[in-house]
Amino acid sequence: MAQPIRIAGSGKNVTEASQSFTFTRRAMVLGGIQGGIGVLLAARMGWISIAENEHYELLSESNRVNLTLIPPRRGWIIDRHGKPLANNRTDFRVDIIPDRLHDKDATVASLAELLSLDPEEVQRIKEDLKKAAGFQPVQVADKLDYAQYAAVSVRLPELPGVAPARGFSRNYPAGAAVGHLIGYVGAASAEDYEENKDPLLITPGFKIGKDGLEKAFDKVLTGKPGAKRVEVTARGKVVRELTTRPDTPGHVVRLTIDAGLQHYAARRLGAESGSVVVMDCLTGDVLTLASMPSYDPNSFSDGIGHLEWNMLAEDDHVPLRNKTLQGLYPPGSTVKPMVALSFLEAGLDPNATVNCSGAIRVGTGLFHCWKRGGHGTVNMAKGIYQSCDVYFYHFAQQIGMQQIAGMARRLGLGQKFPLPFPSQSYGTVPDPDWKMKKFGKPWERYDTVNATIGQGYMLANPTQLAVMAARIASGRELLPRFVVERNQPQPRSLGLDPRHLTYVRNAMSDVVNGPGTAGRARLPIPDVLLAGKTGTAQVRRITMAERRGGVLSNASLPWKFRDHGLFVCFAPFDRPRYAAAVVIEHGGGSGAAYPIARDVLTYLYDKEKAMAALEPLEKAWGGTIEQRMAAAMQRYKEKVALEEAVKRGEIALPPENAVSAAGAE
């Protein structure tokens, strides 16, 4: 029989039975714990296999199957006759998804070799990768042929992060002629995605409207994406395509624009910096909104290169600005018919005369007429068709600025039109209240004198000038329209006396067809008479010293100091249907504007005559818009290459060229 064991210091005897009992108890506790864990594991396995079966089945399926969104085709933008201004072309493209790249430099180098990318494009890709958020696709190239597309596709296992795709890209058939009108599309930015966490925004090949009508109608033009399911291996290699759901294209937007007229107007502006706006006097439909020089929206939509962007940004003719809506100019004498209407409504007899000797004193200042020798005896009609400044100086002081400003606003100057463009400038119709609020100074008589000939504080954009011409021609409160819509309400009457309108229209006809200032603006169309008003807007003040020494001609001044040339018109004069405004920046005077208006309106009646007038001009200018832009790009590349060679010390310029080279930096 085993003897009990005494544990020192405890006063207890430990027997074999007590040891056995203790072991058994511990074993039962451990067994219970193990059993509990086993039950929990079994319950968890049951929960996973039964209750969460669908969830894990989906996870498993997602490992096996990739779901890729298919960017929707954008809706077309067409003109009033159904001709496309913006459409889509079938396209092979390659993009990079930055957060999937393993070796950025090696990947870009491989793509450059496969796709024969020039150094400028490679540099553009690298810089875009630096700027892009991880989710934002960076375009490598588009408009690829099938061989290039296939060359990248077969090397995808070696090029993680590269995403070749077959889809559609935006196309603008008229190119730069519609740049400011239509705008362009581009990849969504990081800010766009943060604002709207739509996965479509980070889908390679998907683009949103960035400017112009593309931006204004983006929601309408964007369709619904499709989807493609493909089976892949654990390493992501495509095994087979399972199913595809096609995309739904966006809606078509039909504009009031006449595509042929738009293209012609842009071409007719030639090398000038200016704009042409043509409206329908019956409806307010805008038939053309041409601003030149412009940019090619195809370049922006495809990812514009740095050289081309820098060339556009540095051009003093500002091709990145839509002059028809963002350009503000003193309207000059084009406002004189409007001022005459305000005189008539105030009760001035149109036969009242003033003697124009070439200048008139207002307070302590002498205000000159454009004709140094004066116009002699001038009534209202002669004041319009001979554009006599002294006539308007004299009677404006009697009538007052409030009457003139009220008529200006009724005819559309200073008015904010509800147009589908993200950026507009609205100009100024000044009056005493405006000056006090703006400058804290009272209105002076010389302010009225300046404003009455469209100078001083008065500013307008070309679209407002076209609206003014259309309202004078129609007598109705026309609003510019850009989208064809059914059941448009008829514009209401301006409430002007028909006799006043007839008087002013007759005087405007004499500007072109009588003893006026724009005889060369006559239309070469039988039985169609053009009525108009010339305007010259000074961009700098002519000093008395210059007047005494003989005012320099515009041709002898630097381009940016030359006067603007303006012309507003409508035709036919007796049954107005079309109204137009032409503004030529620093054109030297109205003589730069009204020949363009003549040819553009001729196009509406006889396309062959209009083209016959244009073609010899384009030869003298150096070719079509596209040819001149290509030549300008080549000159800019050569200039940049020369400057870089000088910086590297490879070429030493002669001393007389050193200053210009440094300034170009």
Image (cartoon, grey):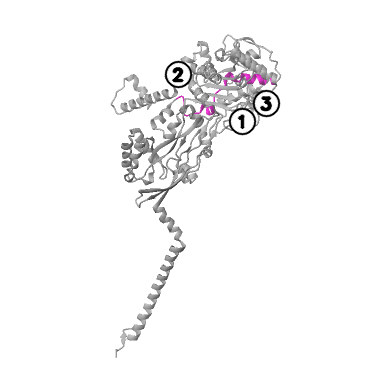
Q: Secondary structure at mark 3?
A: loop
Percent coordinates x, y for residue 283 in the rendering: 62, 27
Q: Is residue 457 visible?
A: no
Residue indicated by mark 3: 494
User: Mark 2 Cα within 10 Å, few/some/many (few <14, many 20+)?
Assistant: some
Residue 437, numbered label: 1
The mark that comes first in sequence, 3 or 1, is 1
> Which is the main secondary structure of the residues drawn in magenta?
helix
Q: Inspect the image, locate mark 3, and give the three-letter code of the amino acid beneath it.
A: Leu
Asked which secondary structure carries label 1, the reply is helix
Nearer to us in this view, 650 or 251: 251
**Hey, which quadrant is residue 314 in on the image?**
top left
Q: Which region of the structure is painted magenta? A: 316-345
CA–CA distance in space, label 3 to label 2: 41 Å
Left or right, 364 with respect to 591, comes to right
Asked where in the image residue 300 lies, by quadrant, the reply is top left
The answer to which image quadrant residue 528 occupies is: top right
Please report the residue visible at 43 percent of the width from the left and 26 percent of the height from the top. 315
Q: Distance between the Cα atoms at labels 3 and 1? A: 28 Å
Nearer to us: label 3 or label 2: 2
Q: Which mark is residue 618?
A: 2
Percent coordinates x, y for residue 506 in the rendering: 64, 15
Q: Quadrant of the N terminus?
A: bottom left
Near mark 3 (Cα within 10 A), the count class, few <14, some 14-19 or many ≥20, is some
Mark toward the viewer: 2 or 1: 2
354 shown above or below 429 = above
Return the x and y of residue 480 as percentages of the image width and height.
Answer: 59, 29
Looking at numbered disc 2 in the image, what kind of residue is underneath it?
A: Glu
Residue type, numbered disc 1: Lys
